[in-house]
Image (tube, rainbow, N blue to C red):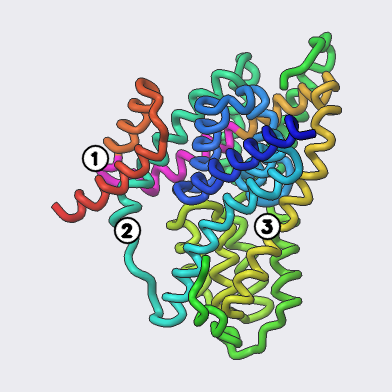
Amino acid sequence: MTPKARPERGALAEVAAVFLKLGLIGFGGPAAHVALMRREVVDRRRWVTQERFLELFAASNLIPGPTSTELAIFLGQERAGWPALILAGALFIVPAMAIVLTLAWIYVRFGSVPATGWVLYGVTPVAIGIVADALWQLGRTALRTIWLLLLALAVVGLYFLGVNVLVLLLGGGLVAFVATARRRPRSGGRGVAGLVPTFWSGPAAAAGGASVSMTTLFLTFLKIGAVLYGGGYVLLAFLRADFVSHLHWITDRQLVDAVSIGQVTPGPLFTTATFVGYVVGGFRGALVATAAIFLPSFGFVALVYRWLPRIQNSPSARVFLRGATASALGLMAAVTAQLGRAVIVDPFTALLAVAAFVVLRRFQPNPVWLILAGAVAGVLAKLI
């Protein structure tokens, strides 16, 4: 019993350290989070192989909720079992939640938040370079045939034509399955704080003056977390439909501010729920909203993880998963292109993105240093 307990405790401590760090430095959205996780768990720590990482990444894309958070939960489970499943997800979420909650408190008290543009001016291009490196590495592993490469490129094109994300993911798996249905399957398979007391006295009513039910708040965010595919833009649509149009708890301006703060802070974009929860229900509302929107992800991962061994042992399921993985990489590339257009706005930001990619390819440093260097560069560029 004792020899077995020590490695488990060590593994749990390692999981906690990794995902707490990623929660603190995870700027740039889901694609950047995936890139940072790959660096940590494949290249640096070798918890999983590149192939296994891709399998967990594909599974994360096929279930509702925040993909990068679910990948973190999968990787925690993979590394150290059920306790680490909860630990990895919670510690990836909590830093972002704390930062967003602090900014929400400032926003409610003073009507705005301090400008973070200087730091983000340098950090976001670096994040694009980190994602480009991850796409290079993952693509070399996952897109081994010309057909999978063409499938990924087709997904990029269809994404920009407005095809639904879930349709692209499932469709990619089905295309791969049909294309290889008559081939002989290969044998064998290949194996993601203390807050000041005044936070409790947040607003008790929403923008429109209506009283806020914590039960309704919880159930609404639970529903969003359980059914949402497609990331931040789809989250914006859900939030507007529920909290602006239906419940009339916040205004359009507050919704835009909420999503903006979710984007400029590290960690999952779904911590936008923390901001909305605080605006309508104070500190308690923030906790309720955050718990509700992320809760389904823990349940989905716990269920799906149990099925992964069966998928690995099924040639047909492996073929489907390869197609879904190619589609997921195509989506990752398309989203990165969108983000790149938004954040690479001049020669300086273009230079930062290219430099981050080249440095990663050549020297393989810890991406934390690149993010810190990007933050310093952004501030200096604005000051000079």
Within-10-Å neighbours for mark 3: few <14, some 14–19, many 20+: many
Dot 1 lies on which element? Answer: helix
Q: Nearer the viewer, mark 2 or mark 1?
A: 2
Q: Alpha-carbon distance for marks 2 and 1?
A: 17 Å
**Residue at mark 2:** 117
Stretch in magenta: 329-349
Residue 173 at x, y = what percent? 74, 30
Q: CA distance from mark 3 to mark 1?
A: 38 Å
Q: Amino acid at mark 1?
A: Pro
Q: Position of residue 66 (x, y in %)?
A: 63, 50
What's the CA distance linking mark 3 and mark 2? Answer: 28 Å
As for residue 319 lying within the magenta part, the answer is: no
User: Hey, what amino acid is under mark 3?
Assistant: Phe
Q: Could you say whether the residue bearing mark 2 is in a helix, strand or loop?
A: helix
What residue do we see at 13% from left, 52% from top?
384
Name which residue lies at 84% across and 35% down: 307
